Image (cartoon, helix red, strand yellow):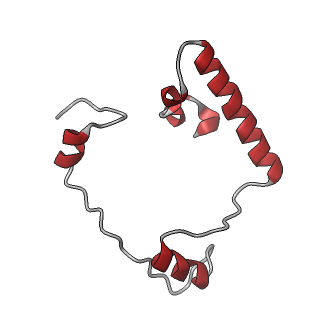
Amino acid sequence: MSKFSILPDGSDLKSMGRDLKFYPVENSSPKTLSKDQIAHYNSQGYIAPLDVYSSEEIESIRKYFDELLQRVVAEGGNSYSISSAHLKYGPVY
C-alpha cells in the first residue's frame, strides 16, 4: 500500500480504478431538492442558484478565509498551501 498523499499524482489516479461515469439521480420522493432541480442536475450537471448560506454566514466564511490566506502568505505560503485546509482548520471543514 502506498503512502497517503493529499494531492495524488497521475500514476496514483490511474491505479485507483475509479468509475467516473455519470449516474442520473433517481428519487421519486425527494426531501430537500425539488423534482425539477433533480431533473436539471441530471440534464445539465449542476443546480443553480442554490442558497446554502445566509449573507451573514457567507460574509463570516469569507472573512475567515481571507484572514487564513493572509496568515499563510505571511508565513511564506501561497493559496495552494491551503488546498487541504479542510484537514487542518476546523472552520473550513
Question: Residue 7, percent across and down?
Answer: 35, 35
Question: Residue 82, percent across and down?
Answer: 52, 30
Q: Is residue 20 above or below residue 72?
A: below
Q: Residue furthest bottom?
A: 28
Question: Residue 10, percent across and down?
Answer: 23, 41
Q: Is residue 40 above or below residue 72?
A: below
Q: Residue furthest right?
A: 56
In the image, taking residue 23 as reference, residue 36 lies left or right, namely: right
Q: Quadrant of the C terminus?
A: top right
Quadrant in the rendering for residue 38: bottom right
Q: Residue furthest top?
A: 75
In-front residue for pair 27/72: 72
Which residue appears at 49% of the width and 75% of the height?
44
Quadrant in the rendering for residue 89: top right
Which residue appears at 75% of the width and 47% of the height?
58
How many numbered marks, from 0 up?
0
In the image, taking residue 82 as reference, residue 63 lies left or right, namely: right
Question: Residue 29, percent across and down?
Answer: 55, 84
In the image, taking residue 21 as reference, residue 68 lies left or right, namely: right
Q: Quadrant of the N terminus?
A: top left
Quadrant in the rendering for residue 54: bottom right
